[in-house]
Amino acid sequence: MENSHFKLSVNSETATLRSLIIHSPDSGIGRVAPSKAQDWLFEDILHLDTVRRKEYDYYVKILLYFLDPERIKGRLSFIDSPASKREFFKPSKQGFHASGKVIEFERLLCEILEQSDIRKKLTASVCAIEGCSYKLQQELINTSPSELSSIFISGSMPHGNMIFPPVPNLIFTRDIGITINNFILLNKPAKKARSRETLLARYIFFNHPLFREYRENILEIPDTVQYFLRPGEEHGEKTTIEGGDVMVVSPDHVLIGCSERTSASGASEAIKLLFDRDVVSKVTVVKIPHKRDFMHIDTIFTQVDKHTWVVLGSISSQQQHKGSEPVDYLSEKRNKEKPEIFQFEKGKIDTSRMYNCIEDLLTDISKNDLNCTETPRFIYSGNNHFPFDVREQWTDSCNLLALKDGVVMGYDRNDKTVEAFRENGFSVIHAEQLVEKLEYDELSVEEIEKTLILMPSAELSRARGGFHCMSMPLLRES
């Protein structure tokens, strides 16, 4: 896929989305063994057919109606029929939608593997990471690009034999890289389970024709100098960064989280790169506890529109949770989960501005970066009522993807958060209902405003990532 009209530009979290990279659930997700689930960064094993047919397929459909309607409009009845065999959703099949705006990672991978030299180099690299035999390496080099791309992702040969682990986290394409203006900042993962997907992404961005004009704008985080000479290498701080910890809130301002997955060293190296290359002039670091239930900053807050944010109340110093127990001032520290927030400006790196709480930062962004005249408002996970706030944050109530300003996608299971959206004047519609209305012209994309789209989530939410995680935007309107 080479698109001469392809443009790379993201300078907002909520401007109208025009293109993105996704990865539909592959057979590797159906091969996650219970004994290895946590090693492979999954909380549970998922039922693959349910995830695909009843959940993720709706995500693809809605993205296409919003971003590339010609690919889907008028075809819904056939796409959903048994005769279609879901070929519409499978990059290796003839009936695949092949959108140049809702871009499948596996398709990009397959296309670079058609180049013999890339196929040899990437196969050697994968085999080195996975410790494969030389004989298997030669067998893989001689495999067709479509089969090889599937093998690299699922870890399984066409006959079903697993030769190395799957990469089930690839559905969370936010973490392979982040588009900042017309640059791409590549992931440097904290966990070994994500090494292969990072390698595949690196080869795609540096070798696929789609990104040819932007190769000089692809940024890789270096390790700190002579890190390998430090004592206790296994336990020392690694230089890591993942896309879920990076938010582009305005053309000149990026947020970077220091979390379980992004180290202080990784954040520091990213700041240096962004300032040295004149990508942005301001970076705010949000340090959050290294907790599995937080993971990235986009698991505790995301933006809904210019003046609206969805936030986990327990990280705030402004909110008292409804139903929470009184604080024992003598033996407890109030609000242990409160982030530390530091803001750096280019040319003033030796001084930083601090914020008292997350709302102060987000208010400043809405008012001063986005020139919003309305009073910023906050919608709290679980309607800020314990224990629903933390229960629903666990199932990604704060991890929403904006299709355009004020129109966001989230899971249907977070009832109290949905209640909070309604109380703040948002319409709520289920994905299945929305698809029908868009297909039969009962509603147009242009008419949809200030809306939370509820996506089916019984299985998909158990993978611990929402739609912000499952998207790598490449183009948003300025």
Image (spheres, helix red, strand yellow):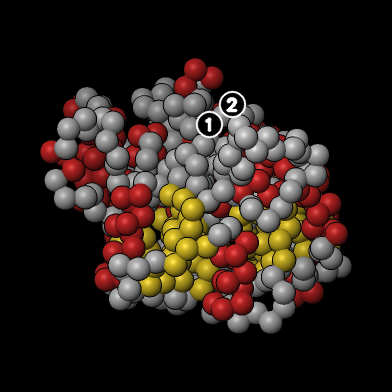
Give the residue pinned by disc 1: 42
Q: Secondary structure at mark 2?
A: loop
Q: Residue at the far front: name it.
A: 330
Residue 18: x and y, percent? 57, 70
At label 2, the amino acid type is Ile
Residue 371: x and y, percent? 60, 82
On the image, which quarter does residue 270 sit in?
bottom left
Residue 51 in view, yes or no: no
**Quarter of the image containing the N terminus?**
bottom left
Q: Which disc number belongs to residue 397?
A: none
Residue 308: x and y, percent? 69, 66
Viewer-proximal residue, 439 or 194?
194
Residue at image x 40%, y 28%?
165
The correct choice, above or below, for 61 with respect to 237 in the image is below
Relative placement, left or right, of 231 versus 180 is left
Give the residue pinned by disc 2: 45
User: Label 1: few (<14), some or many (≥20) within 10 Å?
Assistant: many
Relative placement, left or right, of 158 versus 436 is left
Residue at image x 54%, y 19%?
34
